[in-house]
Image: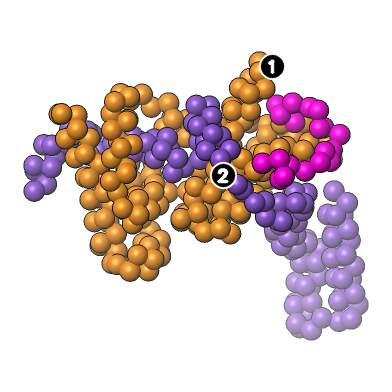
């Protein structure tokens, strides 16, 4: 890990992570300071962000993972004003909270990239990216029985690679409270090419994968 | 077949989908979104050797690239300067041929508009 850490490059080397985000958040008043703070932040977090984005390597490939990590860090700069700091003085907790926030950004960008929507809004609009965090938090805070959750995680191991990727990809069209929407034809075609199968089969595979999970949980709940 | 399946699986389909998404995240198929998941991820990452691509060496370039995109988008949208449009319309009204004077005036208008934009 240390080999990848650059030597200190900015005057913000001793500032806390939350302070860096604060400097970024006032970019409309002092862009140069905000960029410098972000640069320091970038070097502190690039390894973590790249590391977690590698979870999507199966679907995005190596270059896609790099782009996702960079887009996530750029998005941090753009959305710094939306971050709510802990200000608790505990660096580890603050760091974990920042990483969790970046995780939500990365996941949203990942799903957006699957939907082939622009992952970064190049035009300044107040609404740009504004609904990301609450949507994810809704899912994140969903109460569920821990035994059920554990069983579901076990059940995921029973899926093969194809089922796993199709299921994960389908969540790009998932709306909380509505469920998974119909996957657009072009996306479906991309998946059919990749898995050498038909669109009808892709939908079947997804349905079967969910059934498989449901049955695993039901069967093991009864035991 | 579907009847028996729905009897076996007592979970509401919408809830199941939500829970599956959460389970996938907790399992590490997605990026961590809670502090507990972050701590778990960091344990795993500590054991991995990550080689940083060289494209991560110059972060400022990423921001410059982003702002350049903004400029291109914005300059395309604002290209139709009012005065230039008026000059074009006048040239069209007079028979469609743009005289060197009008062309020169259009060029001056465009240069002035672009200079004004870049100074903002």
Q: Determine the colour of chain B.
A: purple
Q: Is residue B8 visible?
A: yes
Question: Which chain does tag 1 point to?
Answer: A
- The residues colored magenta run A1-20
Question: Which chain does tag 2 point to?
Answer: B
Q: Residue at x 46, y 56 (%)?
A: A59
| Frontmost residue, A127 versus B30 | B30
| Frontmost residue, A157 versus B74 | A157
Q: Residue at x 85, y 54 (%)?
A: B118
Q: Quadrant of the C terminus of chain A?
A: top left
Q: Quadrant of the N terminus of chain A?
A: top right
Considering the whole magenta stretch, tell me its main secondary structure. loop
Does the magenta segment cover residue A13? Answer: yes
The image shows a total of numbered marks equal to 2
Assign a secondary structure to mark 1.
Answer: loop
**Residue identifier under label 1:** A89
Q: Which chain is orange?
A: A
Return the x and y of residue A162 as percentages of the image width and height: 33, 57
| Frontmost residue, A133 versus A143 | A143
Q: Is residue B11 left or right of residue B58?
A: left
Figure colour scheme: by chain
The answer for how far apart the CA atoms under marks 1 and 2 are is 29 Å
């Amino acid at each position: 890990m240390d080999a990848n850490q650059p030597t200190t490059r900015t005057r913000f080397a001793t500032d806390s992570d939350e302070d860096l985000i604060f400097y970024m958040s006032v970019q409309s008043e002092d862009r140069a300071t905000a960029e410098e703070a972000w640069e320091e932040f970038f070097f502190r977090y690039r390894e973590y962000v790249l590391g977690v984005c590698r979870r999507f390597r199966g679907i995005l490939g190596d270059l896609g993972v790099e782009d996702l990590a960079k887009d996530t860090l750029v998005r941090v700069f753009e959305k710094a004003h939306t971050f709510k700091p802990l200000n608790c003085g505990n660096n580890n907790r603050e760091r974990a909270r920042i990483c969790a926030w970046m995780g939500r950004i990365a996941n949203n960008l990942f799903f957006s990239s699957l939907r082939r929507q622009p992952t970064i809004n190049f035009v300044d609009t107040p609404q740009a990216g504004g609904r990301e965090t609450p949507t994810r938090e809704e899912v994140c805070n969903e109460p569920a029985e821990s035994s059920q959750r554990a069983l579901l995680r076990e059940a995921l191991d029973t899926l093969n690679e194809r089922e796993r990727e199709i299921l994960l990809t389908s969540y790009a069209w998932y709306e909380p409270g509505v469920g998974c929407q119909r996957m657009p034809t072009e996306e479906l075609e991309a998946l059919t090419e990749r898995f050498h199968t038909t669109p009808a089969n892709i939908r079947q595979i997804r349905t079967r994968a969910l059934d498989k999970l449901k049955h695993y949980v039901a069967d093991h709940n009864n035991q | 077949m579907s009847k028996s399946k729905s009897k076996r699986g007592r979970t509401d389909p919408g809830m199941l989908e939500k829970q599956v998404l959460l389970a996938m995240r907790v399992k590490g198929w997605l990026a961590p979104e809670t502090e507990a998941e972050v701590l778990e991820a960091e344990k795993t990452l500590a054991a991995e050797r990550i080689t940083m691509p060289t494209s991560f060496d110059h972060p400022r370039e990423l921001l410059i690239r982003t702002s350049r995109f903004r400029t291109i988008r914005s300059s395309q949208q604002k290209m139709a300067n009012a005065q230039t449009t008026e000059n074009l319309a006048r040239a069209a009204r007079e028979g469609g041929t743009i005289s060197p004077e009008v062309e020169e005036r259009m060029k001056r208008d465009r240069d002035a508009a672009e200079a004004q934009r870049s100074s903002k």
